[in-house]
Image: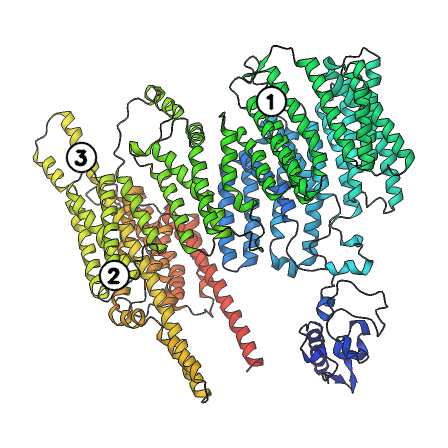
Amino acid sequence: MIQRLLLLQIGHAFSKTQTQTHPSSPLSTPSSPLPQLTLSGIPATAKMIPPELQPRSFRPYIASSISSPSFSSSFPAASPYSPNSNFPSPSTSSTRSRFSASFFAHNTRIALALAPCAAFLLDLGGAPVVAILTLGLMIAYIIDSLNFKSGAFFCVWASLIAAQIAFFFSSSLIFTFNSIPLGLLAAFLCAQTNFLIGAWASLQFKWIQLENPTIVLALERLLFACVPFAASSIFTWATISAVGMQNAAYYLMIFSCVFYWMFAIPRVSSFRSKQEVKYHGGEVPDDNFILSPLEGCFHTLNLLFFPLVFHVASHYSVIFSSAASVCDLLLLFFIPFLFQLYASTRGALWWVTKNANQLHSIRVVNGAVALIVVVICLEVRVVFHSFGRYIQVPPPLNYLLVTVTMLGGAAGAGASALGMISDAFSYWSFTALAVTVSSAGAIVVGFPLLFLPLPAIAGFEFARFVTKKSLSSYFSFVVLGSLIVTLFVVHNFWDLNIWMAGMSLKSFCKLIIANVVLAMAVPGLALLPPKLHFLSEICLISHALLLCHIENRFFNYPGFYYHGMEEDVMYPSYMVILTTFVGLALVRRLSVDHRIGPKAVWILTCLYSSKLSMLFISSKPVVWVSAVLLLAVTPPLLLYKEKSRTGSKMKPWKGYVHGGVVVLSIWLFRETIFEALQWWNGRAPSDGLLLGFCIALTGLACVPIVALHFSHVLPAKRCLVLVVATGLLFILMQPPIPLAWTYRSDIISAARQSSDDISIYGFMASKPTWPSWLLIVAILLTLAAVTSIIPIKYVVELRTFFSIAIGIALGVYISAEYFLQAAVLHALIVVTMVCTSVFVVFTHFPSASSTKLLPWVFALLVALFPVTYLLEGQLRIKSILGDEVGDLAEEDRKLTTLLAVEGARTSLLGLYAAIFMLIALEIKFELASLMREKSLERVGIRHGQSSESSSSNFAPRMRFMQQRRASTVPTFTIKRMVAEGAWMPAVGNVATIMCFAICLILNVNLTGGSTQAIFFLAPILLLLNQDSDFVAGFGDKQRYFPVTVAISAYLVLTALYSIWEDTWHGNFGWSLEIGGPDWFFAVKNLAILILTFPSHILFNRFVWSSTKQTDSSPMITLPLNLPSIIISDVIKIRILGCLGIVYTIAQTIISRQQYISGMNLGVFLQFNP
């Protein structure tokens, strides 16, 4: 036993020296004494551990000059056992382990694949799946916030499993596909995707990384191995659902290529130590990659064959029906094959070989074969199928020239991309190929033979630019290419008298020519010196403006359908998306290469992004209005990105200017907002809704300005909160807007004058909406006070006026909105709300005399409750009872009045329940704050006394600072409130009990006494405070006792009432006959009800005492609850039985946890006296 303890001490000392990283530690210098932990006089660590693993204190041969930790980024090539080699610091050597717990670095990559899949599955599952998943994740979040990490982990998985079960029952996949195999396969795909989402969520728990490192590595490998299969299938499924099945295999091919690039390219694991790279001269070991060669092989097979097999399975009856169908088969194989050969330049074929020469040979040979096949298939499938009318050469010469053009261009592009143009022969070959391709292409499109030297010279100049990087050659190519394009367009389209999208074809040809010329000029202008980069910026912005104008005319114009058929869209939506993302990618690339400045990046990003608004809003000026709005909103994000530079921070006057520009842009955007709201609601929005959206968008647009550049300015934040809150209130309340504040354009006036609303909905009685202004004012005043814009905290008079104003506003609003028929209640409701407002405000910010007056204010509030309730409808009821019974209409009027009175009284009960709940919450918060301040003051006094007794020579200045700090404690809040605010616990308890009682009455009136409601109402009793006047011994440990007692008592009382109601049958006499069915029913259920008492009594006693149970009495009472569940006829008794079982199990678990905690504490105190 002694030897084991010694070995444990030796291991502890060794691990302590291994992890010592502070340079000033005694163990980091040779002069520090060695640990004298030896067995038989022999240093244990010196004999047992090799030199390279020994800490520095056990290496006597290391000089003091090199004994300090080394933080260099590379290791020398010397032997690790050499005494002259620089060893890494102990902290570095400790991070060389095969596993390193860290943040999962590939979250963005996984999110791009799985987040859209999750959204698609939620759409398929519908409301049940969304509800279950939302509830489960909320519970998991609450458990995680309580630092119960394992519980949150299992709750996440339970939520996913429950959501998947609900998905199976709600999605009806078998009926959707009308095939059992396809339905089962789709269900398996959805379950696999759900499992991958759970695996991704598991990687976010740090404790799993620390406790189960092998599982974390396996989950990471599982995600990268399986996500490409599931994500490509789900993405294809969603695309087919949107656009149809015709080109489904090509969609699958595109998504397979995308996810192959994202996951099959070798990536280093997030949980492998990054220091291991240094042992291999910068080359990452194979076992540090996430995927193994086996997964790389499967990804390659999926990329090459899955789209092809999918096409064969879905078009098996027509795959050999025509040449185009055969070309589809070849394209679906060889296009992914070409993509994989290109991906091999980034290491995609690392599992085949790492020899660079072999990989280059594989790329060249296989790429040449695949390129030939792809070009020939594209000729058949695309060129001659769709553009055959523009080929001006008769067969068979047209096939030869088109093949030369396409195959030669593809071969030249491939050779240039692979860097094969490196000597004189390859240069002249590439030049000859460029001349031949350009000439053949010109002949194919019908270019006049007289001007054939122009395309040949253009090809020569382009080849010279590619090989020699000559700008003069490129601009010559641009001039000649522009001339060729112009001649082609004029020759084929100029004389056609066709109108498209509201403009003639000739005008469209002008725009196309200008756009092509600008696009051709951009590459050459981007290569100019930095001083001339403004030319490329102007060219890019002009090109983006032209592209926006063309797409806006063709996509967003009223007459853009052929013959009214939606299938013949002139400019499809996917082209808008494609040009947008290509433009954004080009802007990012030019920005990374420092070819354009930040202002050009800002303008181009806004222009390209504004095109996406056409997909959602069908308005002619939506592109330009969106562009202006983005230009106004995005400067804080795009123009001031470098936070480390002082010049990149926005000046105050710039902030005001940007804010004004935002307001102006929102004002220009108002008609688009109106059209969007009209499309969403199906009718013209009100003026309040439109103004609310404008105000809210203004506030949200100013968030980047305040958050990124004026985060230190509190008034800016407060004003921003008020602006956004004002907009949201206008959206929710939609108050009536004066005519002076409204804007009536032609579009808005035409929408408001429509008679469809009257013809559909008829004439509807309008309800007065002016009280909504009072609620808006009250909420905004409250926000202004909370954000300290109105300094009610420091001015008592202002606090008084504020509370009275809030009370009057809320009282008038409630009276006019909910009690319009009962004029007698208006004054009482206003007084009630004023008393409530005064009580809450002065309880939160007490004054010198408020502590004496607030109990009387609360007493007045309690007295107003029965008075208001009894006076409601009293006069109307008297008038009804005083009248004689008349005709049927009069009886209906009296019945309606009685129902109105009952509804008004129910509303009053709800109002007072909310008032008492607010008061109870406020007092609970204030008492908690008061106890916290008293504990801090007590700790400060003890600390001051101990400091004075321990240091007699304490510095006078420090003593003065300590006295000054103690004097800054709010003595009024602590001492005066303790002396004069002793009423607070009693008032809080009265408010809590009244709120609970009113809620029980409302439960009986509204739901007929719902059993489930008690589980939501009983937690109100948690607001009870420690008060010796009412309940002695009630403290913080007993705070759950009222909740459990209320639940048990309510269920027992309602069960007794149910038994009485079921056996009495409403007769006035005694209806029970001895031995009859009613007598047997009552006796049986009463006996079963009594059997549930022991579990509830024991658990409530346990909750009150909070002491651990050493006996097994709770488990003995457990079987007594089974008869109530099995043979009871009353649902309340069954709930009592289930609750008794839950109580017993909970009491047993809590007692066991208390026992284990006590044992651990005893062991700790035994070894650490």
Residue 1007, image x and y in percent?
A: 31, 42
The answer for how far apart the CA atoms under marks 1 and 3 are is 63 Å
Which corner quadrant of the image does residue 254 belong to?
Answer: top right
The answer for how far apart the CA atoms under marks 2 and 1 are is 67 Å
Residue 723, image x and y in percent?
A: 39, 45
Under circle 1, the secondary element is loop
What is the number of the mark on residue 366?
none
Q: Quadrant of the N terminus?
A: bottom right
Q: Earlier in the sequence, mark 3 or mark 2?
A: 2
Residue type pointed to by label 3: Thr
Which corner quadrant of the image does residue 1102 belong to?
Answer: bottom left
For the residues carrying marks 1 and 3, which lies nearer the camera in this image? 1
Residue type pointed to by label 2: Val
Question: Taking 605 as reference, is 485 left or right?
Answer: right
Give the labeled residue for mark 2: 796
Question: Taking 824 as reference, is 798 left or right?
Answer: right
Say whether marks 1 and 3 touch (CB < 8 Å).
no
Q: Decide which of 907, 614 is in the foreground and name it.
A: 614
Residue 973, image x and y in percent?
A: 31, 69
Residue placed at 11% from the left, 35% from the top? 880
Q: Earlier in the sequence, mark 1 or mark 3?
A: 1
Say whether marks 2 and 1 touch (CB < 8 Å).
no
Under circle 2, the secondary element is helix
Under circle 3, the secondary element is helix
Q: Earlier in the sequence, mark 2 or mark 1?
A: 1
The answer for how far apart the CA atoms under marks 3 and 2 are is 45 Å
Give the labeled residue for mark 1: 571
Label 1 crowd bin: few (<14), some (14–19), many (20+), radius 10 Å: some
Give the labeled residue for mark 3: 897
Residue type pointed to by label 1: Tyr
